[in-house]
Image (cartoon, rainbow, N blue to C red):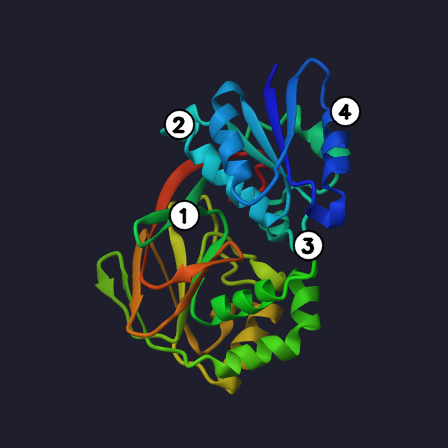
């Protein structure tokens, strides 16, 4: 029988994280060995996985996308490959829960407990972003420029509303921050080839990202590559058009962007350009990004090509 380490952010979901974690533990097969631990602050989930992850078959993150990312960091530190790392699951309970739609994670504790009995896990790629010698993995997406400006603004005034609701509630502040942003030129090299200068870039490991938007409908974490979408120019009109395309169809449907796939991407700028990873501000350019193919086994249904 599989053994589990459940790691919960008790503050997730306006304080409902602990109750959801308890429900999951109670509904898991009683023959499973299950340990439930709570985080006490930023980075604690990563430490918990590194301390205890080698002793279990599966680690389940319970909370928001930030908790999932911290647990992912810990899982990657346990072994050298997916075969030697515990499988990773997720019970969404945050304010944005972007990964829920992107990967098909189940938000209901009862359904998840039932599904875990037959889920083998699916090998998935991750992105690795290196900023100043510090490596940060991501499951979903990494952005530099305009989207990171939006993420910065949402996080600077975070009050529990994230996702599309947070974007709507904070629209005046977000628009003002985008208008103020000077959009320094971003330079990119993808798989050794220099790309055209851009105003911003999104590196997507999945199709759906924050706010219910789609970067590229064909983006998938199961192909060994990352989708590179560069925004040619900034400005209110172009930014609004790109945002509309992203929400209604996909960002790559906009005439203001270029799209390709790559395994390695180097990004730099002479200006101060913010960077975000999985919806969290992480610093400023330069950044080197690469794909680690089949790096982790995700406990999700095998429903994608």
SS at mark 1 in the image: strand
Dot placed on the residue nearer the N-terminal end, 1 or 2? 2
Labels 4 and 2: the sequence-earlier one: 4
3D distance between C-alphas at marks 4 and 1? 33 Å
Observer able to see residue 304: no
Quote the CA–CA distance across marks 1 and 3. 22 Å
| Left or right side of 120 for 26 | right
Q: Are marks 3 and 4 in contact (CB under 8 Å)?
A: no
The x, y position of residue 83, in whole percent, is 42, 25
Residue named by callout 3? 95
C-alpha gap between disc 3 and disc 2: 31 Å
Residue 283: numbered disc: none
Dot placed on the residue nearer the N-terminal end, 3 or 2: 2
- Secondary structure at badge 3 equals loop
Which mark is first along the chain, 3 or 1? 3
Q: In this view, does 200 lie to the left or right of 93?
A: left
Kindly identify which residue carries mark 4: 26
Please indicate, yes or no, whether residue 9 appears anywhere in the rendered image.
yes
For marks 4 and 1 on the same chain, the one whose residue lies earlier in the sequence = 4
Please identify the residue farthest to the front as the structure is shown.
40
- Tell me the distance, in whole angstroms, between the alpha carbons under discs 4 and 2: 29 Å
């Amino acid at each position: 029988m599989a053994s589990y380490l459940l790691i919960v952010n008790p503050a997730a979901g306006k304080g409902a994280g602990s109750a959801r974690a308890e429900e999951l533990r109670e509904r898991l097969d009683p023959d499973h060995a299950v340990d439930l631990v709570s985080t006490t602050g930023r980075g604690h989930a990563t430490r918990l996985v590194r301390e205890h992850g080698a002793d279990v078959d599966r680690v389940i993150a319970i909370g928001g996308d930030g908790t999932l990312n911290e647990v992912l960091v810990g899982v990657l530190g346990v072994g050298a490959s997916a075969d030697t790392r515990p499988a990773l699951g997720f019970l969404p309970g945050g304010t944005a829960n972007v990964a829920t739609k992107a990967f098909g994670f189940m938000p209901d504790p009862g359904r998840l407990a039932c599904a875990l009995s037959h889920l083998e896990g699916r090998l998935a790629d991750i992105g690795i972003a290196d900023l100043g010698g510090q490596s940060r993995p991501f499951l979903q997406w990494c952005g530099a420029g305009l989207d990171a400006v939006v993420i910065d603004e949402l996080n600077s005034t975070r009050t529990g509303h994230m996702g599309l609701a947070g974007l709507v509630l904070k629209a005046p502040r977000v628009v003002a921050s985008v208008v103020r942003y000077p959009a320094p030129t971003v330079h990119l090299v993808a798989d050794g080839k220099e790309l055209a200068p851009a105003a911003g870039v999104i590196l997507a490991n999945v199709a759906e990202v924050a706010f219910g938007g789609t970067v590229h409908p064909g983006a998938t974490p199961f192909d060994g590559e990352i989708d590179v979408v560069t925004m040619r120019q900034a400005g209110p009109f172009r930014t609004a058009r790109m945002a509309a395309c992203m929400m209604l169809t996909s960002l790559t449907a906009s005439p203001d962007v270029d799209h390709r796939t790559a395994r390695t991407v180097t990004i730099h700028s002479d200006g101060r350009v913010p960077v975000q990873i999985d919806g969290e501000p992480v610093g400023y350019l330069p950044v080197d990004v690469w794909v680690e193919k089949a790096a982790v086994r995700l406990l999700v249904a095998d429903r994608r090509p």
